[in-house]
Image (cartoon, rainbow, N blue to C red):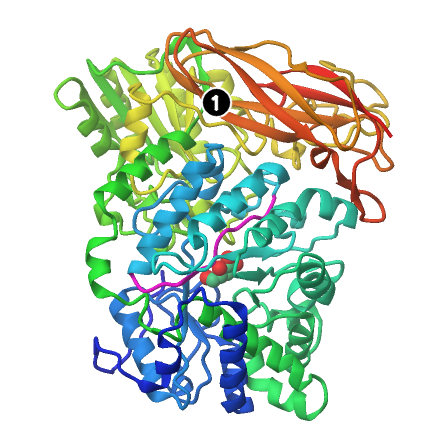
Amino acid sequence: MKKSTFCFTIILSLIFTDAVFSQQKKVNSTANTQQMNQFVAALMKKMTLEEKIGQLNLPSSGDFTTGTASNSGIEQKMKAGQVGGLFNIKSVAKIRAAQQFAVENSRLKIPLVFGMDVIHGYQTVFPIPLGLSCSWDMQAIERSAQIAAAEASADGICWTFSPMVDISRDPRWGRVSEGSGEDPYLGSQIARAMVKGYQGQNYSQPNNIMACVKHYALYGAVEAGREYNTIDMSRVRMFNEYMPPYKAAVDAGAGSVMASFNEVDGIPATGNKWLLTDVLRKQWGFNGFVVTDYTGMPEMIAHGMGDLQQVSALALKAGVDMDMVGEGFLTTLKKSLAEGKVTQQDIDRACRKVLEAKYKLGLFSDPYRFCNVKRAQTEIYTAANRKAAREIAAKSFVLLKNQNQILPLKKSGTIALIGPLADAKENMSGTWSVAADPTNYKSLVTALKDATGNKAKIVYAKGSNLDADSAFEARATMFGKSLHRDLRSNEDILKEALRTAEKADVIVAAVGESAEMSGESSSRSNIQVPKIQQDLVQALLKTGKPVVLVLFTGRPLDLTWESKNVPAILNVWFGGSEAGDAIGDVLFGNVTPSGKLTATFPQNVGQVPLYYNHKNTGRPLGEGEWFQKFRSNYLDVSNDPLYPFGFGLSYTSFTYEKPVLDKSRIRKTDAIKVNVKVTNTGNFDGEEVVQLYIQDLVGSITRPVKELKGFQKIFLKKGESRNIQFTITNNDLKFYNSDLKFDSEPGDFKIYTGTNSSDVKEASFTLLP
Ligand code: BGC
C-alpha cells in the first residue's frame, strides 16, 4: 500500500506523568455511565467550539490509503486540538509517539483514538471473512477476532473497522470477500461472534479493542455488483434480509458504526437521518458513535446533495459523529453553526459520543494503555496464534468435488504443483490484510514440501500467469501482492509445466484469483477462472494424470467448466498467513474438510443474483424441472445453482434421517423440538454442519422458500450416529410485515433439515392463532 511521508519528529518518551489525567486515573474503564457522563460533561465545559469540532475529525495518517484523498498538516492540527483520532498508522512506536504528541501539545491534552482495518487478523492472518464464515464455527470465528484484537492492541491499535457484515448475493461485487455471505441468520451469528471477540465483555482488558460495524447499510446490494453503485430496495426486504446482521452487532454492544458509501432510499447513508438516527439510535438503541467511511462526507457532493458545507451539515444532523478523512466537519461546521444550519446541540452530541468512546477505552486514565512496546515484541504472530490460524484456515476450506476419492493424497511418489498461485506467498493472506508481513508466510510450494518431507517429491512450475493480459494482472496485484509476472511466452511457460507434470503421479493445480481480484473496488463482470488458467488446467487434464484443483478465490466463481472436467476441487479462498500449512493438512488428510458454502455458486454470471432463500414467484418451476414456457426460468440455463448455499463435501459421508418433531401444533408461547439423526457412514472421522431451515407457507407478505434458522457443527467418529436437537421458538418464525412490525403469523410451516440448503428432508407443523 501507499507509503506516506508523514512522520512524527518528536522524541519517544515511555513515561507519562501528566497531572491532567490524575482525576480519572483511578477510574476503571468499566466505570459506570454516571461517572463517565460527569467526566465528559466537565471536559466539554472546558472545550472551545473549535476543539469540539476537532474531536469529530479522523484523518488518515497515510501509512496506507484506501481512497484517493489524503490528509496533510496533521501535526499542526493535533496541536490545535483539531484531531479526534488517527487511523492506518502501523507500529506501536509510531502510535505512542503520535499519542504523546497529542497529549503533550494540545491545550486540553485529549488522547487520540487509533483505528485500523484489522479485518481478518493482524499479522497472524485468518481466512478472508467469506472463507471464515464457511467454517460455520462460531467459537473459531470469535477466537480469530480475539487474536486479532490481542495482536492489534499490542501494536497500539484500539479500534478496528470490523466486522463487515454486509449481506451480498452478488459475486460480481469484490467486497463479497469481506462479508459472511448471503444469509442474514448466519450473518447475524457471525456479527455477534466477531464483536464479542474484539471487545470481550467490555474494554477493561487492554487486549480488547472497539469494533466498528460496517458498512451501514445495504452496501452489499450495489446494482450489477459494481462498486459504490446505487441501491434501491423495499423496506420489507431491507429489514428481513439485509438489516439483521447490523442489528445483531449493535445488540452485541459494538462501540461504533460506519456509514456506507451508497444511498439508501435516495439519500446517501452518510446523510440519511432515517437510517442513522431513527433506525440505528431510536429503534435499535445504539449508543456508540457513527463514523463516515473514507471521504464518505465529501462524496455526497458527487452524489448530488450539495456543496461541502451543505453535505457536512446534512451528515451531522443525520447522526454522523466522526468524519473520516473528509474534513467537512473541520472546515464548515463553525460557519454552519453561525448560519443556523446546525445547532450547538448537534455538535455537542457528536463530540460527546467520541469522548465517551475514548472514556470507555480507558484512554483518559491512560492514553498509552495500548502502547506497551513490550507487548508488541512478544504478543504478535506468536506460535499459539499461528497454530489457531492454521486450524481455523483448514475449517474454512470447502471441498466441492472429490471424484473417486482422489483426496486425501498420499505422501508418496511425485506430486506436481502447478499454477500461478502455487508460489505466491504475498497472496496467501488475501485482500484487506494491511498488517500482514508476507516475508514470514509460506507459499503453497514451501508448505507442501514441509508437509511431505522426504516421503514424497514436490515438483513445481508456474504453468501460466494470472491472466494473459498484463494490464489486468497489474490491476489485480496491487498493494505489494505481486504474482511476479513471468515474461516468457505463454507457450514456454505452459511447456515447462507439462514437462514438470510428466514426472508426477498426481497434479495439484493451484489456480484461481489473486488476492486483489476481490476486495474494495475489485468488481468483476466475468466470474470465471481466467481463461489462460483454464487452458492450463485443460492441458494438465490431457496428461491423463489425476488432477486436484486447489482453488484460490475471494468470491463465488462460475466453475461450471471445472466442475465438469476436473475430478477434485478444494476451494481454499484466501486462508491467511498459515494457509499453506493448512492446505497441506487437508490435502494429505490430517484434517478432514468441513467447510460449507455461505454464498451460492451460480452456473453462470447471468443467473446472478442467485440465492437459496428466494421467493417462489407466481409461476415457479416444479421440483427438478428445467425449462417450461411461461414459468420463471431461463431458456439457456436451469434455475439451479452449481453449488448451493450450505454445500461442502467431506472425506467421509453423512446420512440424515427425517426430522422428527415433538409437536405438530404449537401456540406462540410454545417451543418445538426438532430431532435429527445423523450418521457418519464413511471411512473418516469428521465434522458436519447440520442445517435447519424453515418455510412459512402462507403470510401477509410473500415469504422465502426456506430460511436458515439453526445449525450445529458436530464431530462424528466414523460409524458414529447422533441425535441432534434443535429448539424452535416463536422468535424463529417472526418477520417484518408490510407495516415493518416484527411478528409471527399463525399458519402452516415446513421444517427442512440436511447437509446443505438443497439436500434436505422435511416435516411440518402449525402455529395456532
Ligand atoms: C472502506 C472501509 C475502510 C475504510 C478505511 C474505505 O475505503 O470502504 O471499509 O474501513 O476505507 O480504510
Is residue 351 left or right of 118 when viewed as pictured?
right
Give how far across and how far down residue 409 sits, in percent.
29, 16
Residue 25 against residue 32 in the figure, above or below: below
Per the image, label 1 sits on a secondary structure element best described as: helix
Nearest the camera: 640 or 145?
A: 145
Name the residue type under label 1: Glu
Q: Residue at x 62, y 38 (%)?
A: 185
Mark 1: few, some, or many residues within 10 Å (few <14, many ≥20)?
some
Nearest the camera: 462 or 224?
A: 224
The image quarter in which residue 118 lies: bottom left
Give how far across and how far down residue 444 sits, in percent.
27, 33
Magenta-colored segment: predominant secondary structure: loop
Residue 627 against residue 440 in the figure, above or below: above
Nearest the camera: 522 or 666?
A: 666
Q: Which quadrant would the C terminus be assigned to in this image?
A: top right
Is residue 164 left or right of 731 when viewed as pictured?
left
The image quarter in which residue 369 lies: bottom left
The image quarter in which residue 349 lies: bottom right
Q: Which quadrant would the N terminus be assigned to in this image?
A: bottom left
Is residue 669 left or right of 715 when viewed as pictured?
right
Farthest residue, direction left: 454
Q: Residue at x 61, y 69 (%)?
A: 299
Range of magenta residues: 155-167
From where the camera sits, is residue 18 visible?
A: yes
Q: Residue at x 50, y 73 (%)?
A: 36
- Mark 1 highlights which residue? 562
Q: Is residue 161 magenta?
A: yes
Nearest the camera: 636 or 94?
A: 94
From where the camera sits, is residue 435 visible?
A: no
Q: Is residue 373 magenta?
A: no
